[in-house]
Amino acid sequence: MSTKRSSSGDALEATAFWATGPCRSELRREQVAPPARGEALVRTLYSGISRGTEMLVHRGAVPQRVAHLMRAPFQSGEFPFPVKYGYLSVGVVDQGPPGWPGRRVFCLHPHQDRYVVPVEALTLIPDEVPSERAVLAGSVETAINALWECAPRIGDRVAVVGAGIIGASLAALLRRFPLSRLQLVDPDPAKGAVAEAVGVEWAAPGDAMTHCDIVYHASATEAGLAGGLGQLGEEGDLVELSWYGTDSPAVPLGLDFHARRLRIRASQVGVIAAPRRARRTHADRLSLAFDALTDPVFDALLGGASSFAELPEVMESMCQGSLPGMCRIIAYPGTPSHTKRG
């Protein structure tokens, strides 16, 4: 799609994805001002769909009490609807300060074919990281934050419950640690192939190991949370990465929860985990995510691809649970996709 001048002067036309109601959405034309000093015009190559938070947004399940905390950096509109939401965008700078044009960048921007943002909001993508894999930066950053929240020690027994994009990202990072045992736990047998590709052991919930030192929970299910607590050993830690929106899962705090002195820790990517908050910035954390993404193993986390024009249909299918898989890639006009379609 070529850049067009609008009748309002120097403004450029762009197309953006908007959620307009529960499991309903559309592509809207809008105007984008040309980049000012210190800003860049980005042409999107790919964006990714977060199956967790974005699905809650698309269903209208963001509690008003925390709506201000759940705003994406370049969100437009207000929860519940209409809202322009998203935060996994990879593109190339078409206009910007010297040294920026032609560079590939990652940005926490909603699904949109071109946009203007301050250059401070852009992260340069290393040459070793393909553009499609770079879409995973937000998920890997979330996983890094969880590891900072509760870091494994040598010889630990660690389980990751939930083999979605966050859980699989965690497992891919944890396989580097000198652990005595690591499992990726998920009831879906198809996730066994993901675990194998990442290089970790898969287990169904009924076969999951017990006496774990740490369990990272990312299934966003009541059953997964209960199972994760059951896997912990004495005084073990469960790190909760799932966000349930307006749902209120039951947490099994009876039986031997107190007798075994178990701990549940919340982890949320919006802030740096407390153990590193004084010494790391958001930019440091994102840079570390891109260092990790130089590893081709993360390609196993990429799911099927769809065109930007198909995004409303794709989002509706995902919202209704009829399009399973890992990270869904959205390819923009003029961008070849090498990800397997499905």
Image: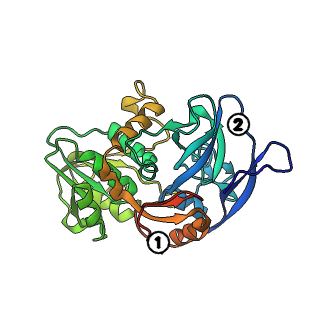
User: Left or right of 204: which side holds 288?
Assistant: right
Q: CA distance from mark 2 to mark 1?
A: 37 Å
Residue 263, position as x, y percentages in the image: 31, 45
Which amino acid, by three-letter code, is at mark 2? Answer: Pro
Please tell me the numbered disc located at residue 136.
none
Point 33% across, 58% down: residue: 300
Question: Residue 56 versus residue 142: which sits nearer the camera?
Answer: 142
Residue 206 sits in quarter: bottom left
Q: Mark 2: give few (<14), some (14-19) or many (20+) Cα within 10 Å.
A: some
Point 43% across, 60% down: residue: 338
Can you tell which of label 2 and label 1 is closer to the viewer?
A: 2
Q: In the orientation shown, which residue stands out farthest toward the top?
A: 279
Residue 223, position as x, y percentages in the image: 34, 65
* Numbered-mark total: 2
Question: Residue 147 versus residue 114: which sits nearer the camera?
Answer: 114
**Image height of 93 relative to 44, above or below:** above
**Image height of 314 relative to 276, above or below:** below
Residue 39, position as x, y percentages in the image: 65, 33
The residue identified by callout 1 is 323
Q: In the orientation shown, which residue stands out farthest toward the bottom?
A: 322
User: Left or right of 46: which side holds 147?
Assistant: left
Residue 126 sits in quarter: top left
Q: Is disc 2 placed on a helix, strand or loop?
A: loop
Mark 1 and mark 2 in contact (Cβ < 8 Å)? Answer: no
Q: Mark 1: give few (<14), some (14-19) or many (20+) Cα within 10 Å.
A: some
Question: Residue 88 versus residue 309: which sits nearer the camera?
Answer: 309
Which amino acid, by three-letter code, is at mark 1? Answer: Leu
The residue identified by callout 2 is 35
Q: Is disc 1 placed on a helix, strand or loop?
A: loop
Point 57% across, 31% down: residue: 120
